[in-house]
Image (cartoon, grey):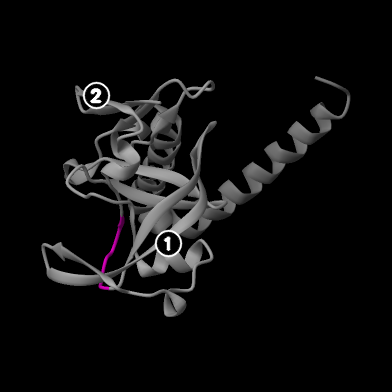
Amino acid sequence: MDSNDLPRLIYLGILLIAVGGWVFAETRQSLGKSLRMLMAWGLIFLGLIAGYGLWEDVRHDIAPRQTVLQDGSVIEVPRGRGGHYHMTINVQGTPVDFIVDTGATDVVLSLEDARAIGLDPDNLPFLGSAQTANGPVKTAFTTVEFMSIGPVRYDRVQVAVNGGDLNDSLLGMSFLSRFDIGISDGVLTLKP
């Protein structure tokens, strides 16, 4: 405590007494109601502080994230809500969220994600087709410069752009087959 702290504490004390006196004078007719409101706001404030303090403990349960070891030897992906595994992969310098789909043959980009990484779907030849749960869709095949997860990088990766309505891009077996895959206790493990 330095020499400036004592005057500050005295000033804050006087200010607190002045504000508290004003509140008491204004609410003396309904003091019980005011105390209940003050206690409610105090509890809300304490709840926010507790939530902030506990966030690191519950974050992994609420919003699980993938983990990539520094040397890239293991990538762990916790199962997300709905039972799916979600991965964020850097595609040509842009993070793209994928659903891991072992039933998909290829890496499939939605039109939105294709545009985000710099592809122009209007200039792609949609000559292929794929059978989806919503029926057949047209696809266009192209090659992206690279896809990376942490230090693990693969150059010149073939992807398909889905010409239909696709909410999420899919990470299919053409990419996943580059890894040893394991699933245990709700965690997908990929080893390059």
Q: Amino acid at mark 2?
A: Gly
What secondary structure prevails in the magenta region? Answer: loop
Q: Nearer the viewer, residue 28 or 130?
A: 130
Q: Is residue 30 left or right of residue 152?
A: left
Q: Position of residue 122 (x, y in %)?
A: 43, 80
Q: Nearer the viewer, residue 41 or 7?
A: 41
Instruction: Name the residue that disc number 2 marks.
Output: 182
Q: Residue at x 36, y 42 (%)?
A: 87
Q: Amino acid at mark 1?
A: Thr
Position of the C terminus, as image quadrant, is: top left
Q: Position of residue 97 (x, y in %)?
A: 39, 51
Q: Residue at x 30, y 35 (%)?
A: 177
- Dot 2, crowdedness within 10 Å: few (<14), some or many (≥20)? few
Q: Is residue 40 above or below residue 67?
A: below
Does 157 lie within the magenta span?
A: no
- SS under mark 2: strand
Q: CA distance from mark 2 to mark 1?
A: 29 Å
Span of residues in magenta: 164-169
Q: Residue at the right extreme?
A: 3
Position of the N terminus, as image quadrant, is: top right
- SS under mark 1: strand
Q: Is residue 124 above or below residue 78?
A: below
Q: Nearer the viewer, residue 114 or 35?
A: 114
- Dot 1, crowdedness within 10 Å: few (<14), some or many (≥20)? some
Instruction: Name the residue that disc number 1 marks.
Output: 142
- Image label count: 2
**Would you say the residues marked 2 and 1 are in contact, meaning their CB atoms lie under 8 Å apart?**
no
Q: Residue at x 58, y 54 (%)?
A: 22
